[in-house]
Image: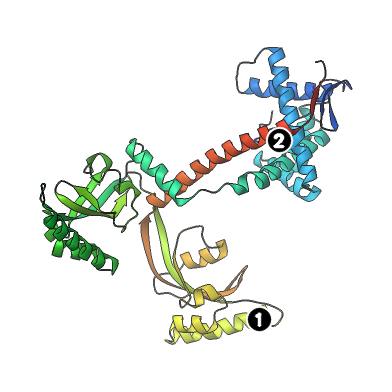
Amino acid sequence: MIKILLFTLMMVNTAWAEPLDRIIAVVNNEVLLESELVDMERTVTQQLRQRNAALPPREILRKQVLERLIVQRVQLQRASRAGIRVGDDGLNAALRQIAANNELTLREFRDVLNEDGLDFSDFRESIREEMTISRLRKGMVEDKVVVSDSEINNYLATQAVQGGSETTYHLAHILISVPEAALPEQVQVGQEKLNKVQDLLNSGTPFSEVAAGYSDGQNALEGGDLGWRKQGELPSLFADEVPNLAVGQVSATLRSGSGFHLVTVVDKKSEETHLVKQTLASHILIKTNELTTDEDAEKRLNSLLERVLNGDDFAELARAHSDDTGSAIAGGSLGWSSPGVMVAEFEEKMDALDNGEVSEVFKSRFGWHIIKVFDRREQNMAEEYNRNKARAQIRNRKVSEELESWLRQLRDEAYIEYRDL
């Protein structure tokens, strides 16, 4: 038996039972037949048994299956009104992918389905329905879900407070000392010193330099450096503030009995590291069009390559000649790129270069290029990884909640008339 992973698999086996034409429900202006219920019930039963899951009582299972059919039907009706259609080309591509996932050709896949008693035409239409519903949900729900940076920050901060994060923070600190039972005049002096410190920081003066010059803390001469601290080791005054700070960001003013405090995150790291090899490179791109043939583009780039090899500045040539306007402004610089960011043919050429080396002229799907590699590094992308993971988790939760609400509304707005089961 082939295991096919789909959002909801609807496999209709016409060999199980002859179609019964008795109407069991009316959904808006369409009817559901008992044959559809029987087919779905057997499919669901088969899936439950494959997972070794306990089967509910027959009458409960039938009601659940009928509800699934109704919800499926109202979605297909909504998709029809929205003009969502899955053409044969897209459907055939999906079927070929399903077959390939099972290491079969489409013909072999069809033969195996037939051997398992499944009608390929019915199976094909069930996949079309699943693709239609998937497109509907994407347009009506998934594409409308937005995850903000503040949601991610709050999520990560909560995880850290709850001990779900192993993030360690490198902190620096500035203290503007004010006596515990300070007179108003003393508080005013402290406030004026704090204002001066904040003005210096806002003007771009390094935090360590300001700390060394103005902090009353014990670590002032070390630039206010507090070293690396895990979440549970953070001073209680900073515990709620630090997880919300980005690297380099300075906190709002924190007040304690000892005075005014500013804290910054110099760096942070996760116990779980995600080292990524990154490349700093620049390129010059010549695109082809109605006026520039492949031969012309290749010839122009070979001329530019010769100039580079003879000592001309790569950045100046990129600014003057590259058709990639975004990078041309920066002298062709692509910044630090991680694996998988560039198209495969470009990345392959870039990875083969040593630092300072320039590639030969080559073609990608975007046009003709030459690349110069300037540097390589291993970068710990744990923070980015954790943020992406948090974004995905938040988005999945929101999609699930929105989808449930949308389906309930769709179901409530439909006209449903039950007939005797």
Q: Are marks 1 and 2 in contact (CB under 8 Å)?
A: no
User: Residue visible at 25% across and 46% down?
Assistant: 238
Q: Nearer the viewer, mark 1 or mark 2?
A: 2
The residue closer to the viewer here, 242 or 367, is 242
User: Residue visible at 89% across and 22% down?
Assistant: 21
Q: Which of the 4 image quadrants contains residue 204?
A: bottom left
User: Residue visible at 22% across and 63% down?
Assistant: 195
Q: Which of the 4 image quadrants contains residue 49?
A: top right
Residue 216, can we see it? no
Direction from residue 76 to residue 348 in the image, left or right: left
Q: Which of the 4 image quadrants contains residue 208?
A: bottom left
The mark nearer the N terminus, 1 or 2, is 1
Give the SS element for disc 2: helix
Amino acid at pointer 1: Glu
The residue closer to the viewer here, 107 or 300, is 300
Amino acid at pointer 2: Leu
Please name the residue that numbered disc 1 is placed on: 295
Direction from residue 368 to residue 376 in the image, left or right: left
Direction from residue 400 to residue 164 in the image, left or right: left
Mark carried by residue 410: 2
Direction from residue 256 to residue 397 in the image, left or right: right
Residue 413, can we see it? yes
Measured from the top left, where is residue 389 in percent x and y?
A: 46, 45
The residue closer to the viewer here, 290 or 412, is 412
- Screen quadrant of the N terminus: top right
Give the SS element for disc 1: helix
Measured from the top left, where is residue 220 in percent x and y?
A: 13, 58
